[in-house]
Image (spheres, helix red, strand yellow):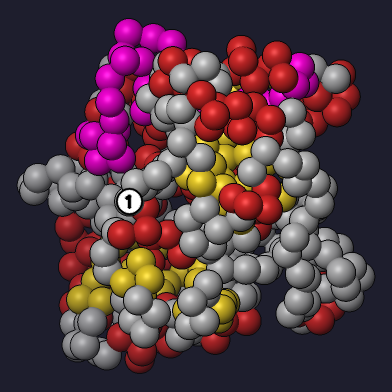
Amino acid sequence: MRREDFYREAQRDSIGPLAGVRVLGVTKVWSGPLATCVLADLGADVVDIELPGGRDGEVPPDIPGTGLSWFRQTVHRNKCSVGVDLREPAGRQTFLDLVADVDIVVENYKPGTLDGWGIGYVACRQRRPDIVFVSISGWGQYGPNTHLPAYDPVIQAASGWMALNGEPDGQPVRAPTFLADELAGLHAAIGALAALAHRDRTGEGQHVDVAMMDAMLFSSSGLPTLAATGVPPARSGNETDFVVPSNVYPCVDGHLYLAVALDKHWRALTEVVGRPELADAPGFRRNRERLANRDAVNAVVADWCATRPVAVAVAALAGRGLVVSPVRTMADVVTDPHVVERDMLVDTQLHNGTAAPLVGPAVKFSRTPTRIRTGAPVAGAHTRELGGSNHGGDRQSASNLP
């Protein structure tokens, strides 16, 4: 399918499928802002409440040529910002005035914080009985650990995920991205939309509880089930427990990753590497045999890769329908024509007149396309316009339709 075929029936003035949905974010750092970023990218009208002294805009490094932090610009695009001190009575009143006119509230403060300020779920429900109120935290709104603070790497460690990451004989390694935050933010957006669908069907709002810990366990590929039944998974580095070969292999000028999940692909691989006799040899014929003969199988592939450039090896393997890729740097990826064609890097004008290539929305909609409509605002930029007043409707212009 061509790009123009996919978007043939697109609404030319679309801002996304959530146009008209109103969201109030009381968020900081990453998980909460990412959740509201997802909703904003989908077309929701998102207003962030930002407390004085917030540091999200100061996280280094700056995007070169902009003077602005990558941190804020990444997850605060497509939003408006109202500066309110929720610790003060006037600020709390402004917040509750805004709640009366929104569909969803998203917050990621430590459990009990918003209740202590008098603006938690109970207070918001009094202002809008059908409110969908989404809380993101490290450990959830109930349970023995709910009072504990949490950062992303701490949850990676506590969830068992970090112990599984890294080489078998090495130390546990954290993910290089905010994995627990990202997963919690995505589950929060999903939870908000599910609760909104329930409200539209029944008229009932509800409190949605998302724990980073729960999100990590849910996204652990079922491994907690094995651990709970007496089969604790072990660290396997770049390999897997159920497919051989499946590994990173060094080439002359870099690395490639090859996964051979089907026996017919193994037979094709033996021809590519010049070892056709291994297609039906004992210890090699079936995946179950290769699992028990892992070192010998890896040696066959590694020896062949070691004498070839990455591009040559990948072309030969892909030419036979094998699942393979160069191990690319992020700098390699952002210039990939496929990534560009998919709008995963969008040149966006920032609030100070500079521009930066921001990561675009992941989900594509043929009828109601999404896009980055505006860069992140200066904290509090819309306070005069929106503080305590009706803010219905989207203030962003639809442009650059596919």
Number of other residues with Cα within 10 Å of mark 1, as a class: few under 14, some 14 to 19, many 20 or more: few
Q: 286 left or right of 96? A: left
Considering depth in this image, is 295 or 275 the residue closer to the camera?
295
Picture coordinates of residue 233, whole percent (x, y): 27, 32
- The reply to whether residue 183 is in sight is no
Q: Residue at x 33, y 81 (%)?
A: 64
Q: Secondary structure at mark 1?
A: loop
Considering depth in this image, is 215 or 386 the residue closer to the camera?
386
Foreground of the two, 142 or 350: 350
Q: Quadrant of residue 343?
A: bottom right
Q: Residue at x 76, y 69 (%)?
A: 397
**Where the C terminus falls, by quadrant?**
bottom right
User: Where residue 149 appears, x then y in whole percent?
Assistant: 28, 26
Q: Position of residue 345 (x, y in %)?
A: 53, 76
Residue 133 drawn in magenta: yes
**Picture coordinates of residue 16 (x, y %)?**
77, 58
Is residue 243 located in the magenta-colored stretch of the structure?
no
- Compared to residue 399, the image places residue 260 above or below, namely above
Q: Residue at x 56, y 78 (%)?
A: 349
Left or right: residue 221 versus residue 128 is left
Secondary structure predominantly adopted by residues drawn in magenta: loop
Residue range highlighted in magenta: 128-157
Residue labelled with disc 1 = 55
